[in-house]
Image (spheres, rainbow, N blue to C red):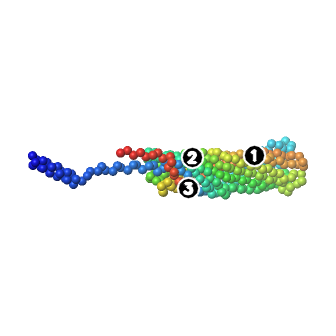
Amino acid sequence: MKRIFVTLALALTASTALAADLPSYKAPPPPPPPPPPLWTGFYVGLNAGGTWANSNSVNVSSIPVFNAGVGGAQPFQATITALSTFSAGGGNNSGFIGGGQIGYNWQFYNSFVAGVEADIQGIATSNQNTTFAGALLIPGFAQSTGSISTVNRSIDYLGTVRGRLGWLFTPTLLVYGTGGLAYGGVTSNTSIFQALIPNSIQTPVWGGAGSFSDTRVGWTAGGGLEWMFWPNWSAKVEYLYYDLGNVSYATSPLVTLAGNAPFTFNVVQSQTRFNGNIVRAGVNYHFNWGAAPIVAKY
């Protein structure tokens, strides 16, 4: 019996030692969680660039409503009407533009990004001043009617609220289209000065003036490229076309006098359109506050 017990003890000791010498097995590490979307979340940024107008003219028209000449057919009235109806414009209503933006992106189906963005910019050196001068001989009279007119138009600030939809050409390069609402502070002025050449005491000089200033609302559309060049930082280049619509405003009437009595009376109206183009570059900081948490399952 002793031999049996000794044999069993030796066998158990040998198996324990052999098991200790065998390499231990460890489970492989779990796979890393998928990377979070780079583009989902809120962002803010700054931009700068240039803008130029598509429409640069201010059209001024006149309608005669009173004439003291017999039968309303005096050449004087026809001449006044002709000189009071003209199109003044020219030049390029352009300037430097700069401001900031805020927005939110949502990355879906891996390669698509949708979002909304709002921005506002100030515009420098956007004024356009044009002066029109001319004279026309009055048929049947030894005098001409001279006219000097000045128009001014400008956009003081411009903002947009747009949707964006893009495709990731690479995980860090977004190509997108954009469109939505545009708004801006616009101003336009018209002044007209007319007189007989040579002048006479019976018919002194006459003129009129009018202006418009308001915030206009319209639409915008365009596209651009945005590059995530550093974690949470991106740079973009963008083109936008905007249209704030037509603006019409009246000037004070053009009244000529014969002695102390009115001789002609013309109603004058000015019209212009505020639309144009923006090319700008910008930089954004992405907070990723709106990104959904990544939950890994093993």
Looking at marks 2 and 3 on the same chain, the residue that comes earlier in the sequence is marked by 2
What residue is shown at x 71% (from left), y 48% (from top)?
Answer: 213
Name the side, left or right, on which 42 lies relative to 258: left
Which element type, helix, strand or loop, lies under badge 1? strand
Which element type, helix, strand or loop, lies under badge 3? strand
Looking at marks 3 and 1 on the same chain, the residue that comes earlier in the sequence is marked by 1
**Quadrant hosting residue 71:** top right
What residue is shown at x 90% (from left), y 49% (from top)?
Answer: 259
User: On residue 250, which mark appears?
Assistant: 1
Amino acid type, callout 2: Arg
Residue 195: x percent and y percent?
Answer: 83, 54
User: On residue 37, which mark appears?
Assistant: none
What residue is shown at x 39% (from left), y 46% (from top)?
Answer: 296
Residue 242: x percent and y percent?
Answer: 61, 49
Which of the pair 56/180 is nearer the observer?
180
Label 3, on which residue?
A: 282
Which element type, helix, strand or loop, lies under badge 2? strand
On screen, 45 above or below 108?
Answer: below
